[in-house]
Image: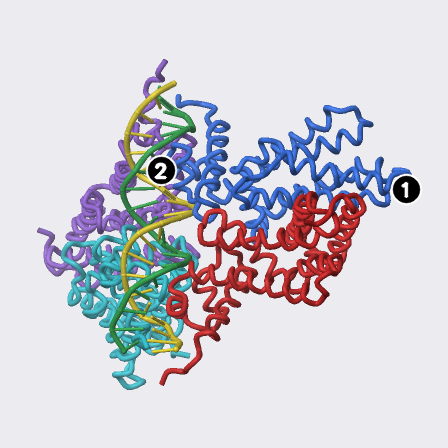
Chain colours: A purple, B cyan, C blue, D red, E green, F yellow
Amino acid sequence: MPKLGMEPIRRRQLIDATMKSIDEVGFSKTTVNSISRHAGVSPGIIAHYFGGKGALLQATMLHMLNSIKHEFQVAIDAFPEKSHYDRLIAIIKVNFSAHQISPIAAKTWLAFWTHALHEESLLRLQKISESRLISNLTYELRFLVGLRKARTCAKALAALIDGLWLRGALSAKGIQAEESIHLCTTLLSWMIEEYKGNDHPN
Amino acid sequence: MPKLGMEPIRRRQLIDATMKSIDEVGFSKTTVNSISRHAGVSPGIIAHYFGGKGALLQATMLHMLNSIKHEFQVAIDAFPEKSHYDRLIAIIKVNFSAHQISPIAAKTWLAFWTHALHEESLLRLQKISESRLISNLTYELRFLVGLRKARTCAKALAALIDGLWLRGALSAKGIQAEESIHLCTTLLSWMIEEYKGNDHPN
Amino acid sequence: MPKLGMEPIRRRQLIDATMKSIDEVGFSKTTVNSISRHAGVSPGIIAHYFGGKGALLQATMLHMLNSIKHEFQVAIDAFPEKSHYDRLIAIIKVNFSAHQISPIAAKTWLAFWTHALHEESLLRLQKISESRLISNLTYELRFLVGLRKARTCAKALAALIDGLWLRGALSAKGIQAEESIHLCTTLLSWMIEEYKGNDHPN
Amino acid sequence: MPKLGMEPIRRRQLIDATMKSIDEVGFSKTTVNSISRHAGVSPGIIAHYFGGKGALLQATMLHMLNSIKHEFQVAIDAFPEKSHYDRLIAIIKVNFSAHQISPIAAKTWLAFWTHALHEESLLRLQKISESRLISNLTYELRFLVGLRKARTCAKALAALIDGLWLRGALSAKGIQAEESIHLCTTLLSWMIEEYKGNDHPN
DNA sequence: GATGAATGAGTGTTCATTCAT
DNA sequence: CATGAATGAACACTCATTCAT
C-alpha cells in the first residue's frame, strides 16, 4: 500500500541531505551514496524523486535561493514602505543572519557558485540571486543617495557584503556577523553622507 | 642522451594546461586526460613530473599565489617607501590587473577556494594568500588612518576587493577593472577622510 | 524489493572464479576483469562485495584454509580417539585427497604461498595453516614414537608431504596421490619401527 | 667512445639486481624500474641488453640453475667415483648450502616456480632443474639400495629436500640447514638399511 | 513507494617499452 | 654505450544510473 503525500517529505529530506553532504565532504566528493546515506534512504530513491543527481543539485540550489528570497521579503516587510534606511539595514542583516552564515550554507553557496560557472542550469539560478540583491539595494538607496548614484552604491554595498561573506566562509573562524554588519553600515552611512541631496529619487 | 632540462618546461606546460582545463570545463570535470590533452602530452606524464593529479593541482595553486605575490612586490616597489597612498592604490590595481581578472584566472581562483574548504593541502596555501592582502593593506593604512583603525579598514577594503572580484567572476561581463578600482579608491578616500589624524601609526 | 540474500551466493561465486582465474592465467595475470569474467558478472561487483581485489584474494585464501581444516576434522573424527596410526594415515590422505591435489587447488596454494612472503595479511593466514599440519601430526605421533621424537618426526613427515605436493604441482603429470601416500606411509612406518618404545607420550 | 666488454658486466649486474628486487618487494612488484634502481642504471638499459623484462627474468632463472648445477658438480667431484654414500651426502648438503638457503635465493626460487606454471619459457628451465636432482640421486642410490628401488628412494629424498626447503622458505626463522641435513641423512640411512642387498645396481 | 543488486563507463595511476639524444 | 623523457595500454577502483522485486 503506497504511502500518500511522501513526495514533498522525501524531496525536502534529500535536499537537506545534499547540503549536509556538501558541508561534510565537499561538492566534488558528494555522491548519490553520500546523499542517500545522510537521508537514511536508498540511493535509488534519488532517481525516483528527482530523475538524477543533477536535478537534485539544481533543486537544492533553488531551495536555498527561495529561502533567502523569503527571508528578504520578511525583513523588508517588517518596516513601513518609506523607512528606506531601516530596510537597507534589514537587507544587510539578512545576508549575515544565522541561517545564511552557517558553515553548511556558506560551503554550499560557494560550491554552487563555482559549479554554476560551467553548468547552464545553475548559472540561470545564480544570476537571479545575484541581481536581486542589487535591485533591492538600488531601490532603497535611490531615496538616500539619489537616482544617479544609487546603482553604483548598490554595487559597492553588494560587493562588500559578498566579500565579507566569502572571506568569512574561507576562514577558520567562520563569518563574523556583527563585525560584518558594522562594516556594511559604516559604508552605507558614508555613502549617504557623501551623496545625500544630490538629486531626487526618480 | 635524452633531451635534458625538460622538467621546468613540462611543469610549466602542465600548470598552464591545468588552468586552461579548469577554465574550459570546470574543476570537477578537469581530469588528467583533459589536462594532458590541453598540454598536448600523454596522461602518464603528469605522474612522471608531479607524482599525481593532486600534486599538480597544488603546484598550480602555488604558481598562481607566487604570480600574484610577485605582482604585489613589483607594484609596491615602484613607489618610495613613504608613498603610502600610492602604494595602496597600487595594491588595489594589482588585484584588478589584466593578469588577475582574466576569466581563466578568475575561474581557477574560485575553483581552488571552493576546493580548499575540504582539502588540507590547498587550505594552507589559501590562508597564506588570504592574510597577505590584509597585512599589506594594514601596513600602509597605519600611516593614513592610524594604528587603531588600520586593521578594520584593511578588512573592509580586502572584502570589497574580493567581493567585486567574486561578482565579476560570476557575471557574464567579467570583472570590470576600471569601475572596481574606482569603487575601491572611493572607499579608501572616505576612510582616510574619516580617520586621518586619529592617532599615530605606531 | 531487490533480490535478497545474494551476498553469500555472490561471495562464493567470486571466490570460485578467483581460483579458476589463478589456475588458468596465473596469479600475476589475475585481474578484477579476469575474475569477473569467470564469474559472469561485472567487475564492479567485486568492490561491492569485498571492497577491493586484495580483500577478495584474502577471502579466497581463507576459504581454502577453512576447506582443508574441515577435511582434516572429518578425517580424524572418523576414527576412535586412540587409533593414532589410523588417524595419521587419514591426515596424510587428506593432503592428497582429490580436492587438494586438483591442479586448480595446487596452483592457487602455490600462488598464495609465494605472494604471502611479501603480503602481511596473507602471511598470517599462511602461518596458521603451516603450524596446523605440524601440530596435528605431532599429537598423534607422541603415542607411536614417544614425546621426545614426535616433533622431529612430524617435521619430517610434513616436509615430505609438502615436497611431494610441490613437485607434483610443478610436474606435468600432476600430483600422484597413490604414490605420494605410499611414500609417506613408508616413512611413517620406519619412524615407528625406529623409535617405538623410546618413551611414553607424556 | 664505447667501453668494450661491458656486456657480461651489465648482464650480471642486472641479474643480481633482479634477485635483490624479488627478495625485497616480491615478484609481482618487481618492475623494470625497481630492477634498474637496484642496479644503479637507467631502465632503458634492460631493453638494450636483454630485449625486455621477460628475457631478463628468464636469464635470471637460468643463472640460478647454472649456479646450483656448478655447485653440484664441485660437490660430487670432491669424492672418488665410487664413494656413493659420500656423494649423496654431498648432494644433500649442496641443497642446504649457504648460497641456496639465503632468503634471497629462497624467495626467488619460489617466485620462479610459481611463475613457471604459466610461462612456457620458465617451465622448460624448471623441468631441467627438477629432473637433475632426481637423476643425480638415482644414479648414486643404485649402488646402495639397488636398481629397482633407486628411483622411488630418489623421489622421496628429493621431495623431503624440497619440502624442508619450502617450509623453511616460508617460515620466519628461515631454512634450518643443519636440522634439514640431519633429517635427510636419517631418511637416507633408513632406506639403505631397508633395501641394501636387494639387487645389484645394473 | 522503496529497495539495493548490478552495471559499465570513466577515473587516477602504474609500468614495459620506445626512442631521440 | 647509456640515458631518461615520453608513451599508451592495462589496472583497480568509483559512481550515477537502471531495474527486478
Callout 2 touching callout 1 (CB < 8 Å): no
Q: Which residue is mark 2?
A: A32
Question: Quadrant of the image for the N terminus of chain A?
Answer: top left
For residue B7, above or below residue D131: below
- Nearest the viewer among A144 and D175 is D175
Is residue B38 among the parts visible in the rendering?
yes
Q: Residue at x 64, y 34 (%)?
A: C178
For residue B44, above or below residue B95: above
Residue A193: give x, y in percent of width and height: 22, 62
Per the image, label 1 sits on a secondary structure element best described as: loop
Per the image, label 2 sits on a secondary structure element best described as: helix
Residue sitting farthest toward the top: A1
Q: Residue at x 35, y 28 (%)?
A: A10
Left or right of residue A8: residue D149:
right
- For the image, the number of numbered tags is 2
Find the distance from the CA under tag 2 to the CA under tag 1: 72 Å
Three-letter amino acid code of the residue under disc 1 = Asn
Q: Which residue is mark 1?
A: C198
Residue D11: give x, y in percent of width and height: 46, 70
